């Protein structure tokens, strides 16, 4: 399953969806075509991608906003999709997020930073997913709330550990940090070895679910 199709499946069950950084508008279009959603909002900070999404979504019940994240969107929605960007940018966008919606977050880097940001800023992760589409992509379902995460969970997640489907991802991360530790020295070597152990523990836990 391709990444966009995977995201669309995670939208199922929400009536009104805001696509933040809509780019091409394909996520909303596929969700409409499958009958998953009833209304959409598409935002982008750049005019070019917004025009592209307007073309893609011609005839669909979507409102378009040239906006920096949520700043120009004041309408209520059930779910906001914030995917395909870095963790630091996602965290910056969430500073203006409403507190009565769910969020689907897909950061392509620094997941440990994003999880830490969420835990410190009154967000709660209530599910996590991972899929492979040339690269591994991790998605977080988030809402307003409280949570505490161990350092290990910042890297491995709390929900991925309880899914057998996470095993290839954990193995990939183990190999990655093992290779980094073999090349590193000093504090970096210690750091990578510790992260390797986190993913090894997660792998062993997921393996035990078989």
Image (cartoon, rainbow, N blue to C red):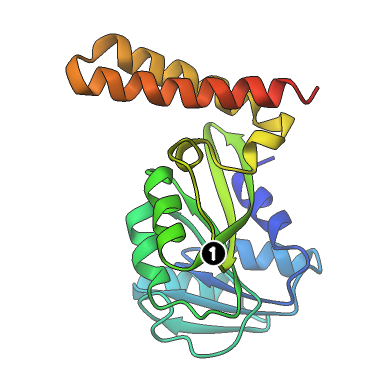
Image coordinates of residue 33 in percent, x first then y, are 76, 66
- Relative to residue 50, is residue 130 drawn left or right? right
133 w.r.t. 103: above or below: above
Image coordinates of residue 182 in percent, x first then y, are 30, 9
Between 83 and 33, the one lying in front of the other is 83
Residue that appears at 33% across and 22% down: 192
Q: Quadrant of residue 15?
A: bottom right
Q: Quadrant of residue 193?
A: top left
Residue that appears at 48% across and 26% down: 198
Between 100 and 108, the one lying in front of the other is 100
Image coordinates of residue 133 in percent, x first then y, are 58, 36
**Quarter the N terminus occupies:** top right
- Relative to residue 29, is residue 201 drawn left or right? left
Can residue 107 be spotted in the picture?
Answer: yes
**Quarter the C terminus occupies:** top right
- Kindly give the residue lying farthest to the top in the view shown: 182
Residue that appears at 38% across and 53% down: 87
- Relative to residue 60, is residue 109 drawn left or right? left
Q: Which residue is mark 1?
A: 146
183 w.r.t. 5: above or below: above
- Kindly give the residue lying farthest to the left in the view shown: 186
């Amino acid at each position: 399953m391709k990444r966009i199709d995977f995201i669309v499946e995670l939208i199922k069950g929400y009536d009104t969806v805001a696509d933040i950084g809509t780019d091409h508008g394909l996520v909303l279009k596929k969700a409409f075509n499958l009958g998953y959603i009833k209304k959409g909002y598409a935002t982008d900070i750049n005019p070019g991608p917004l025009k592209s999404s307007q073309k893609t979504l011609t005839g669909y019940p979507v409102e378009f906003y040239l906006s920096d994240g949520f700043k120009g969107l004041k309408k209520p929605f059930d779910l906001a999709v914030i995917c395909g960007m870095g963790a630091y940018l996602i965290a910056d966008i969430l500073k203006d997020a409403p507190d009565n919606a769910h969020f689907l977050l897909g950061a392509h880097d620094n997941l440990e930073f994003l999880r830490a940001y969420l835990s410190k800023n009154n967000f709660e992760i209530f599910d996590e997913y991972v899929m492979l589409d040339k690269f591994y992509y991790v998605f977080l379902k988030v809402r307003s709330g409280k949570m505490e995460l161990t350092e290990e969970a910042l890297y491995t997640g709390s929900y991925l550990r309880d899914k057998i489907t996470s095993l290839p991802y954990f193995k990939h991360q183990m190999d990655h940090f093992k290779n980094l530790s073999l090349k590193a020295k000093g504090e970096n070597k210690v750091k990578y070895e510790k992260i390797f152990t986190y993913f090894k523990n997660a792998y062993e836990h997921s393996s035990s679910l078989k």
